[in-house]
Image (tube, grey):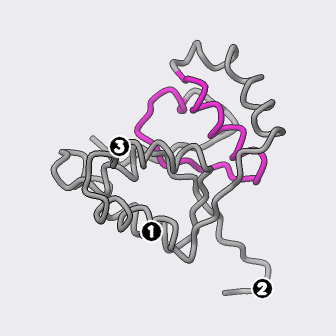
Amino acid sequence: MEVGLQVKTTYIDSNYWIYWFDERLPEHKYVDRIMQETIRKGVVVNAVTIMEVAHYFRNLSKGEFVERIEIILGLSTLKVVDFTLEILKRALSFVPQYSQFGLGARDCVIIATMEAVDVDKLLSHDMGFRKIRSITVADEIE
């Protein structure tokens, strides 16, 4: 890597993790390539997003559940951001403002986390994020 060249990390929303792991979903074929590319470059998530993915996996066998969560948490390019009081307060300040775009409280936690760690790219299929000017949304799903 050249001196001064910084690879930007990307926040990956829970829907992309779910589409990537669940090959039965029609979205899987669209996200596989970009997930692999994004993971190689660097990924940020917060604990809330990991819990959303875990909630989706809840009906798997214990072994499959643990294996999938360990795959995510074991990624060498992954940074998990704690859900701090500062991020909570910032997220709460976004709720009234961004609810008009169809974004909920957990979505506001994503925006606050991205702001806290200076990440401006989001991989998500949630259309509401596209209305937030401070972030760039990447979405490969047709």
Whether 138 is among the magenta residues is: no
Tell me the SS state at disc 3. helix
Tell me the kind of residue under disc 1.
Glu
Give the residue at x 63% y 20%. 98
The disc label shown at residue 20, or none: none
Residue located at (39% from left, 68% from top):
36
- Earlier in the chain: of badge 3 and badge 2, it is 2
Which numbered disc covers residue 70? 1
Q: Quarter-wise, where is residue 95 in the image?
A: top right
Q: Mark 2: which secondary structure?
A: loop
Q: Position of residue 126 (x, y in %)?
A: 44, 33
Q: CA distance from mark 2 to mark 1?
A: 33 Å
Residue 25 x, y percent position in the rendering: 20, 46
Q: Is residue 38 above or below residue 108?
A: below
Q: Which residue is mark 3?
A: 56
Q: Is residue 44 left or right of residue 125?
A: right
Magenta span covers which residues? 103-130
Question: Which one is closest to the eye, mark 2 or mark 1?
Answer: 1
Lateral position of residue 37 relative to residue 141, left or right: right
- The spot of residue 79 in percent (x, y) is 64, 64
The residue wearing badge 2 is: 3
Measured Cα–Cα span from mark 1 to mark 3: 15 Å
Where on the picture, by quarter, is residue 70?
Answer: bottom left
In x, y percent, where is residue 59? 27, 46
Kind of element beneath mark 1: helix
Nearest to the observer: residue 47 or residue 38: 47
Q: Quadrant of residue 131?
A: top right
